[in-house]
Amino acid sequence: MIKVVRVKNKEEISKKAFEIMHELVTSNPKAVLGLATGSSPVGLYELMIRDHKENGTSYKDVTTFNLDEYVGLPKDHPESYYSFMHRNLFDGLDVKEENIHIPSSEGDLEERCDEYNEALSKQTIDLQILGIGSNGHIGFNEPDTPFDSVTHIVDLKESTIKDNARFFDDDISKVPTQAITMGISNVMAAKKIILIANGENKANAIRATVMGPVDEKVPASVLQNHPDVVIIIDEEAGSSLYKEKR
Ligand code: GLP
């Protein structure tokens, strides 16, 4: 079931998501967190770091699993998701490096996928954080990804490459064309899911996710089948909800 929470702006989205995160990690210090990249969760991560520093909320027994990683960028590239996560979250918390899981895209990719699925199969994610692509992707599960997919290699859609060019000097030729991503069934195995989105360019994807048919053409629509999803959006991302299609 999807619960939609509409708030005024990005800051409020981060606060709402943080409330749920904080409640989980304080009540269950060994929580398993599913984490996302992109600009959407950055405000949440800032609040987690601030709370850790000011109030001492500890993540030392928390385990994390990231959704995805680019193929073709070395780990130490500033736009690799490995670098992103350390810069925006892990460097500011006390998570143990050995408890951090980010898909690796080095070496034999099929082996990396198998290893990640194996690691995921040993744990249950308590709370999965998701952003959403303007085409409805979650993680890097692009439209038409089978709902029963597990960690796999994807060819990124042109729309995703264009969307993500902003992180690569607006130069499409610098954006990787492939990624390794947790599959949709891995995401759906989480006990609770929070999807956060802001801005007008997410409005159609949010509408299709919440109101559209559950269809592999809109990967996030699968969330309608999950028992506990909270979608936290600002006014712009929610601007197409409950209206006639524009
Ligand atoms: C990337 C990530 C997704 C993320 C999406 C949206 O494609 N792989 O996990 O949800 O970007 O990014 P943003 O939050 O910057 O709009």
Image (cartoon, rainbow, N blue to C red):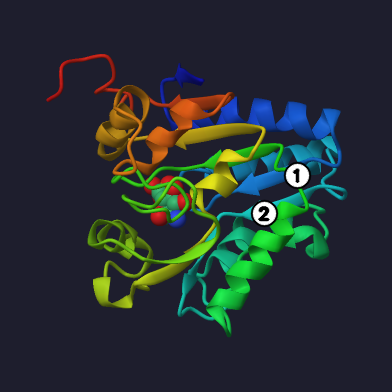
Instruction: Determine which quarter of the picture holds residue 111.
Output: bottom right
> Judging from the image, what secondary structure is the residue with disc 2 in?
strand
Residue under label 1, please give it: 32
Q: Name which residue lies at 68% across and 69% down.
A: 115
Disc on the earlier residue, 1 or 2: 1
What is the crowding at mark 1: few (fewer than 14 residues within 10 Å), some, or many (at least 20)?
A: many
- Using residue 10 as the reference point, say whether residue 19 is left or right of it: right
Q: Amino acid at mark 1?
A: Val
Front residue of 81 and 143: 143
Can residue 194 be seen by looking at this rendering?
Answer: yes
Front residue of 85 and 194: 194
Up the image or down, 172 lies above or below 41; here it is below
Q: Name which residue lies at 80% across and 54% down.
A: 95
Q: Name which residue lies at 79% across and 44% down.
A: 53
Q: Which mark is residue 21?
A: none
Residue under label 2, please give it: 65
Q: Are marks 1 and 2 in contact (CB under 8 Å)?
A: yes
Give the Cα separation between the discs numbered 1 and 2: 8 Å
Q: Amino acid at mark 2?
A: Phe
